[in-house]
Every structure is written in structure tokens, then in C-alpha cells.
Amino acid sequence: MIDATQTFSIIVILGAALVSGSLLAPYIVRVFNGGPSRFDRILDPIERRLYRLMGAKPEATMGWKEYFLAALLLNVGQMVLAFIILVYQNVLPLNPQGFPGLSLDLAFNTVVSFATNTNLQHYNGEATLSYFSQLGAIQFLQFTSAATGICCMVALVRGFRAGSANLGNFYVDFIRSLTRILLPLCLMAALVFVALGVPQSLGGYVPVKTVEGSTQTILVGPVASLVSIMQLGTNGGGYYGANSAYPFQNPNPATDVLEIYLMLLLPTALVFVFGELLGKKRETRPILIGTYGLFALDLAIAFIPPLPIVGPGLETRFGGFFSTFWTVVTTAVTTGSVNSSLSGIHPLAILSAFMGMLIQATPGGKGVGVMYMVMYIVITVFVVGLMTGRTPEYLGMKITARDVKLVMVAFLIHPLVILVPTVLAYATHAVDAIPGLTSLPTSVGFTQVLYEFTSAAANNGSDFLGASANTPFFNLATAIVILVGRYGPIAVLLALAGSMVGRKRSSEHSLKTDSNTFSLVLIGSILLLVVLTFLPFLILGPVLAYFQGMVNFFG
Amino acid sequence: MARQTLGLGRILERARLPRRPSLITGSTLIDSVVRLNPISLLANPVMLIVEATFVIVAAMAVDPSAFVPVASVREQGFYVEVAAILLITVWFSTLSDSLAERQAKNTANSLRQLESEVPSKKVVTEGWEREIVLVRSNELLKGDLVLLEKNDVVPVDAEVLEGIAMVDESLVTGESAPVRKAPGDSLIGGSKVVTDTLTARVAVNFGESYVDQMVKMVEASKRPKTPNEVAITTVLFGLSAIFTILIVALLGLSATLGLGADLSVLIALYVCLLPTTIGALLPAIGLSGITRLYERKVVAKSGKAIETAGDTDVILLDKTGTITVGNRQAVEFIPLEGHTEGEVGEAAFLTSWFDDTPEGRSLIRLAYDKGYVPRELNAITLSEVYEFSANTRTSGVKLFHGSTFTLPKGGHTRIRRKFFHEEAGERGMHLSEDETEILKGAPDSLLKAGFTAPTNFSKLVEEISARGDTPMAVARDHQVIGLIRLRDILKAGTKEKIQAVKAMGIRPVMITGDQPLTAKSIAQEVGIEEFVPQAKPEDKYGIVLKEQAQTRVVAMIGDGTNDAPALAVADVGLAMNSGTEAAKEAANMVDLESNPAKIIDVVLLGKQLLMTRGAVTAFSIANDVAKYFAILPVMFATTFPALRALNILGLGLNSAVLSALIFNAVIIPLLIPLAMKGVAFKPSDTMTLFLKNVLVYGVGGVIVPFVGIKLIDLLIGAL
């Protein structure tokens, strides 16, 4: 239960995200439509140089296969680059702490995790990564993965747009989203964070003598820049193992609120971008009502238990309310950063976190959240649209058997990559390698393992296990889950968009997807689909923990 | 002000077939059992899975010890029960298939009886020789010539080559009056020649006529899935895949975590989650959609055509036959300056004496009723007849004065033959002193012929048109003396049908050869905003293309050869059975009763089919929520007693699984009537229908099983 002030805080933060998101949307649309901008004089030459560097022809247009392959190839290239940096960081510069290179499986897991915007971390950054790795591998991938997500959504919308002939050019979208959206926004955010007390330095850790006379190492580094992109890009991978629970990454309530706001900003803006880029602003409505309606439900579930929630080891700097709120937001937008240990969170708040990651569109990670929403809309339109007595249509296009096949495959990937490895983790006794896990009650232990794979599949990155999951099985399994969970649905949904290009549009009298009625039915349908698919597992995890009277997951 | 539309049942033409035999017969039951074999189930993957689970549980029932630890010997009785319910579930599904197929076959057969094997006279030509050979109708091939004499039954669909005769089609169409057939007209197999002799060319091979085609289409195994059915099957397959992953994962977890879930309970959950309801009823729904058309004597060439009908955006309606009954009736004689009503009436009487059309007959009736029987009636026997010609668009007589012939026995037809001259071109020429020429025709055609008319003529013509009536002018000796008001009679029930399609967002467009003013008035009367006046049949083609260019789905009817191109391009083309072979060949549906108004029924039935499919799908998926709440608390109850808090239905721990499973099975036969009759709906706009159906079948689908499962649980508890 939350009081009036807390409800007010939620409304203010969400309101701010909605207002600024809707204001930012027209700018983003202009960026991707190639509209003129006052920055053209500075940015155009830089961008041209970058295209030449990548060997890309900016005037070429791409079909869905080319677009997807371009994104995949670029991502793989970046992974290889980052992999080399991580494995050989001991011989690379900017390593004042002299950290050794990462093990191959951990490096693989890490690059996959960061290149896909997941940021599942099986390591503690402050004790593992050099400054060069933090900047050249981690922060670099956080930018590119965020850009990739946005590009794929833009391509999807282009496919659905009336009169479109192709999905655009990936390289152009990619570079422009970096130069004109992510970098400027992050620069602004980083300056604010520095002003609010977040460190940004390459000078090495600072040993100091405390008043009690003992020595303490102050772990400073390029933190502010990372925090900006990790939240703005819904990455979530922190500088420190404890993420934003660590004081330097999130020093005070002001940074806490700002970080929550930044997480919501781009995913919300992209919801508005959908309608605007489509040329049918009203079509934003089902996505907006759908995402925020489900988000409100997440919040309601999380705030059922009484506050403050206290338990041993619980991060209490921001109190139960802000910790829970953060947890809901970070899973709703698949950021995965944390400001408190998940183990201290109430089972119902964890259930809410699961909902966010299972739905993946509340409003979901930037770009992909909207893509998943389109997937849900197509499924819903097909199943309930028949009840209007017409062949179901979305945006005036008849939904064919092939479309249905594609969205069903996209939907099927999620349960497949969550449930199969979860069972395998138990069946192969890989869970035994995680210290203490098997001694926990079933509900608690199972929740942690299920959460690990759910977070990986949803490209979220928050986790219970953290560095304790740095085992070959978990490093490889989660990496595979992340890859399939990221590129599978993107490929399939881009194929759907590709088949929409140039399709006949008709009928002024089909189901109105931009109506409130449909938006509500959409919420019901998403809940039904997700609940039907995952309910037994949620019941064995957080729901069981709740009924067993637990208040957190320390066991 | 939106007028309340009527429900579907009040709008559609009544199904007019003889009472069908009962559906549940021994052969239906045997058929449904035969269909239980796995090979027949291949087409229905959901039911195949259920049958596979039956085999597993049956094995558990036979020897539970072989399945320990996921089974327990103490639960043998329970396994027997679960296995039985699983088998019954599959059987309910095959039963619904058998019933729907029986119903379709019964309907088709009752139409097919019209076309039984009959002796027929085949014309064999050798050089100049013609010979008549008696053969059975099944030996006739397409292209053969047959001779049809009085009282002969038309063996198969054919096209008239020579001769004119009256043909009784009442067996096929229900229309009692014999129809006149001339060269080019098509004959329906099963109809009977009642006068004269015809030579006709067989249009199809025996066994290929429309009725035969549809009998084949109702055999489910041969019926190809429609695009929409393929899409739904894909959804069902996807859901089944998800639930398969889910159950396998649960099984794996239960084994590795020691959760103690019983395999039979897991299987029960699996089967309950599978979309068995829609999986079982999907084939029956599609077949019944076809049957509902058959019952209205409309033969669709494919299931897809019916679905497309549901998507119709624009319906092109021929005014004649659809909106109005074909015949116009004379209702008023209007004299022009210097003439009396009596003069006009008598002149009209004379011009119509040889006019056998309904219009002509109505003129005589009106004149007779008003007492305007002309003095010159005797003279008419010696008159020269001008039959209606499309060229001059007039008809009439030329009378010779002074003759005192009396009407001989045998009526005017015989006389007409005797005095018949086809000299239309000379009409209005060479009138001598003792001749009087009386003509009637379209006002403009008389003026064009150079006839004179008083000044108020055009004004009166316009006035008549403006009221939706058709003016006809009567002229005596090159002078127009008056007008006749012909009125179109609106077809009963058409207004309601048009109201219904408009309510569903479909645009009716009226096509007519009438003057714009007449067309407008009639269109307004039935509530149609768009109409194309003075249209020729060829114009339909252009209209269809124009609408399709704006990506609209167009439905239309047609009967003549002129209509064939339009019928071929239209998304939904309904040909009249009385029409030409070319039209029937081009269309994707044929109405055996040749009632053009049925195009609206076809569209509404198409919508009903799609709606029924959507409703049962949504209902089936929504049902799963309640089944979860019945089974999940019980499944892990021994290991985690805390989960009993989820047993919100308060089900008995032993009967919860059985209740859910029984509900899952019995909902299939309970919905068979819905599947076969189609969902009832009141034509209204898309969003109203959507909201209503979502509430009834979606939300209802969540609530109903909670109640149903609880009731079954109470029943089991009481036993």
C-alpha cells in the first residue's frame, strides 16, 4: 500500500516521461525521415565520413532481409571487437588497477549481453573491468545496442506505413540515431549527473584513510557517462556490481528520480513515434493505453504489500517505495538496472517484475517494446477481429495466414528460451554450482533461476544471481538465450513488416484499432496470452513464495 | 436517426427445403467412431494430440506401476476416468464433424434429387442426317445435343439452341409459373418442358453440374481449407506448441525438483489448455456455413467465396429483381391537352392487346377496370401488329377501319401469328385514310420518331419520373395523346435487407436502366444513396473495376452474357441459374432460385460464418483461465499446501481435475448447435458488433467455465 505522496511521485515521474516523450517524438521522427535540422551543418559531414568508414551507401534502400542482416552483422562485428578488448584488457591501456583479462565464457556472455541491450552481468564491474573495457567495450555496446533497437522499430513502422516501398537503410538509421538522438541526450544527462555528484574520471581508484584510521579505496571511474546511456538506452548494466544501489552510481534521491525518468523517456517517446512515423497519429493510442495500462497493473501488483519492506541486507537508502518503484520500472522497460538488491524485494513486487519481462511491452525496451506491441496487436486483431464478421485487418491490411504464422513464431520464442533452459539448469544440476542456491526453499531458489532466464530472454539484465552465475553453464546458456531472445523476434517481426510493404489496403469499416474499446481488449488479450503461457511457473515461484508468507527472497 | 435493424433471422430468406431426416442416426454415429482412427485425425492436430494423451493415460490405467514416480498405483481408478473423458473429448469432436457432414449431405441430396438419371433423346448428326438415340442421362457428355419434347425432363444443365418453349422449373427453383426459354437461355437439369420442343446443347458432363460440385465439396476430407481456416489453424497450432513446451517444462521441473505432480494431472491440464473446443468445431463451422447457403439454394463453388462475401464493401444491386419485382404496373392514365382520360385508356388498351408482357397485361387490366374498352375492338383482328422492338422502343397496332371481323376462337395468339409482320422500320409511315396507328413507348423515343406533343408533355413526364414512376407515352396517328404512369413494385423485405447491409458499413449501389429521376426516387425509397441510372449490363464491369481500384471488395449479381466479364472480376459474383452459361461459368456462386435479392443474404451469411469462427475461437481460449484455477492448486497441493489458497472455486481436491476435464469435453457438444446454426447477430456497425461479441464470447468465455466447473464439481461431490 502506498500513500498519497508516493502516488503523487509516481504520477509526476510518469507524467514527466509521457509529456517529454510526446514532445521528443516529432524530433525523433524527423531524424528518421531525414528531415532538415539545424545540426545538419555540423553532423552531415561527420555522418558522411562514418558511412564511408563503414563502407555503407547511404542512398541505398533495404528490404527486410538486408536490413536485418546489416543490423546482425554490425552487432556481431561489435561483439568481436568488444570480446577482444575484454579478453586482452590486461595488455590494453587504461588499466590502472591491473585487472586480468576475462575468461572466454564470461567475456562471451558479457559481449552478447551488452550488444543485445540485455546487460546481464555475471561480474562485478569495479573488481573486474579496466577503464578501457568500461568505455571501449561496455559503454560502446550500450550505445550501439540501443541504436540497433530503435532502428529495428523504425524499420518495422516503415513496413506498415502506407505507400512504403522498403524498410529504409540500416546504416543511415543507425548512425543518425547515435549522432542525433543518443549522444546528445546522454551528453546532457551526464552533465546533470556530474553536477549531482556522480564521478566521471579516468584517474584510478583513490585510496584514502578514514577517520577511524583504516584505509578505504574510493572506486571512481567514468561512471556518469555510463549511467546516462545505461538508463537512457534501457541497457541497465552498471559500472558497479551493485549497480545503482552503489552510492557513486546513484548518490542521492535526485539522481534516483532522474534515473527512473531517463529509463522511461525513450521507450515512451518511441510509443508516440510509432503513430507519428506511421502517418496515423491515432494508432499510437492502443500502444500507449496498452503499455501504460499494463504498466499501471504492474505497479498495482507491486504495491499491494505494505511498505516499507525491510529485511536483512535490504538496500534502504531510498526506502521501500523507491526501491519497489525502481524495480517495476526497470523491468517494465527492460532496463534491468537495480537500486537495491532484488533479494530484498517482496514476492509480489518480483511477480510484477516478471510480468514486465514476460510481456516485454510495458512499454518495453526502446524499439523492441513497440515491436512486441505490434505483435500483440496483430494476434489480437486476428483472434477477436473475426468476431466483427470480416477477415481481420490491421491498418487496413488483411491479416493472412503467413502473418499469423510469423507473429505466433515471434510469440513462441519467449516461452521456449525461458522454460527450456530453466528446466535444463535443474536437469543437468547446473544450479548446484551456484553457491547456496540449492539450500534455499524451492519457491525462492526456483524464482531466482527462472528470473535469470526470463531476464536474459527479455534482454532485461536484472538478476538475483549476479556474479555467482559466473559458471560455464550459466554464461553459455544465458548468452544463447539472449541471442535467440533478441534476434529471433526482431528477425521474424521485420519479416512481417517486410511482407506489409506495398500490401493492398482497404476498408473504411474494419475493426478500429485506434479506439479505446480495442485498446482495452488488447490489454485483456495480452494478459490472457502471457498468463496462459507462464502462470504455472509464476505460481511455483513468486506466487508460492507469497502464499508461504515470505516478504523477500533471502530464504 | 438510425432505425432499429432486425435480427439476422428476420432478414434472411427462409430456408425452403423439405424437412430433413434426423441427423443423429446409426450411420452418423458409426462414422464418428470410424473417424477416431489417427489417420483421419491428421487434419486436426489438436485432436490428434488429445488422442495421443488418451493412449498414455490408458496405459497408466492398465499398468500404473510402470509409470512410477509420475503415477501412483492407488490412483488407478482415477486414470481410468481420465482416459475415458479424453477419449470422449475426441469422440465429441469427430461427432461434430459427422453431424455437420451429414447435414450438408442431406441438404445437397435434397437438391440433387432434382437431377436423377432420366432417359434422354440424344441428337446424333451425321452429315446432313439427324438421328435421335435414346440414352441415359449419365451417358451424356458436354457438347452433346439433346431433343426435348413436351413433358421431357431436362437431363442435365444445358443451353437452348433451337426452339422456344415453356419450361417448368418449379422443382428446382420453387417458382410455380413456367418460364419461357429461347435460344441462348440455359436449362436447369431436373426442370420439365411443358410446351413445344427444344434442341439444347449439354453444358456439363453428367456429375459435373453445380449440385454435383457441391455434393463433393461437403465431403470434409476433399474440402480444401479456406485461407481463413488456415490462419486459425496456425493460431491453434501455435497455442498447442506453447502449451506443449509448458507441459514438458512442468514435467521436467516436477521430476527434478520433486514437486510430486501426477502425470495424469499434467495431461489433464495440457488437454484443458489446448484449444480443443475450437479445434473440434472448426471443420463443422466451415461446413455448416456452406450448408446454410445450400438451404437457401445458393451453390458456392468454393468455401473461400463465402468468406470473401463476408468482407464485402460494396454491393451492386440490379434494381429489377432485387429492389423491385420485375414487372411494372400501370396505375394511371394521364391525358394531354385536348384529350380525355378515356381516349388514352382506350388507346392503351388497343396497343396492349397483343402485348403479352406483365406491363401490357397491367395496362389492359387498368383500362378494363376503368371501363375504357374501345369501340374498335373488333377491328383489331384485322390489324397489323408492331411488336416491341429494341430499336424503336415502341409497340402498337395499325387498325383498318370498316372491318367487322369478330374475334375468332383461339384468342389473339393465333391471329397474331396469322397477321404477323416484322416491319418495325416502316412504323409510322404510309398511313392511308382508313388506317389508324396507335403506338406506345418511351416518351423520348416517340418524340425522336418525329411525333408531335402538346406543350405540357415534358413537364408531366418529368413529374412522373420524379416520383419514381416510369412514364409511357401513347400516340395516335403521330400525335402523343397521353401518358401512362407505370409503377415499380418494391420487393417485400428488400428495404430491411438494405437497412441491414448499410448498418454493417456496406455500400449498396443500385444499377438500373431507368432515367436518373426515376432511379433517384426508387433509390431514396429503399434508402440507397448511390445509384447508376441508364446503365447497360456492360457498365457493371467498369463499376466493379472502379470500386476495386479503391481496394474495395465488390459483390454483384448477374444473369446475362453481358454480365460475365463483371461477374468474373467481382470478388463475389452470384449468377442466376436462369441466366446464361457464360454468366454461371464466370460467377463463383449460383442461385438456383434465380432471386437476385439473395446477394444480400450471401453477404450476411458470409459474415455470420466468420463471426462464428471468431466467437468459438475467443471463447475457447478464454476458457483456459478457469481451467488453470481448477487444476493448478491441486497439482502441487501435496508438496505445497500453501497453494490451496488459489483454489478460489473451492473445488474438491479429487474432483477438481475431473470437473475441468469434463467441462472441457461437454462444452464441445453444447456448442455444436452454435457451430451449425452460426451465431445470431443483429446487423450493426463494426465496433458495436465487436464490443458485443467480445463481451459475450470473450468475457463470457472467461466466466462461463468457472460456473460450469463448479457445478460439475458439486455434481461429482453429490454422486
Image (cartoon, rainbow, N blue to C red):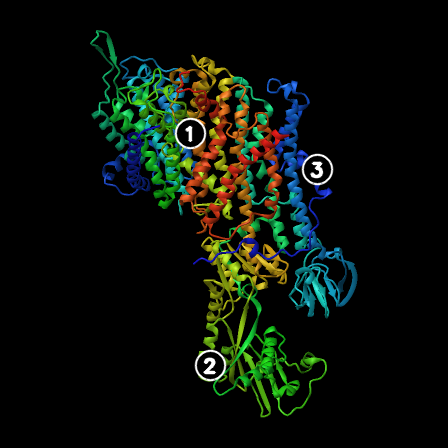
* Mark before the other along the chain sequence, 3 or 2: 3
Residue named by callout 2: B457
Q: Secondary structure at mark 1?
A: helix
- Callout 1: few (<14), some (14-19), or many (20+) C-alpha neighbours within 10 Å? many
Front residue of B576 and B140: B576
Check whether the beta carbons of the residues at disc 1 and disc 2 lie within 8 A of each other.
Answer: no
Q: Position of residue A272 (x, y in %)?
A: 34, 40
Q: Amino acid at mark 2?
A: Phe
Q: Between label 3 and label 1, give the one nearer the viewer.
A: 1
Q: Residue furthest top?
A: A213
Front residue of B559 and B250: B250
| Lateral position of residue A2 relative to residue A428, left or right | left
Q: Position of residue B203 (x, y in %)?
A: 67, 59
Which of the 4 quarters of the picture holds residue A463?
Answer: top left
Do the residues at discs 3 and 2 belong to one chain? yes
Residue named by callout 3: B34
Q: Quadrant of the N terminus of chain B?
A: bottom left
Compared with B545, A501 (above or below) is: above
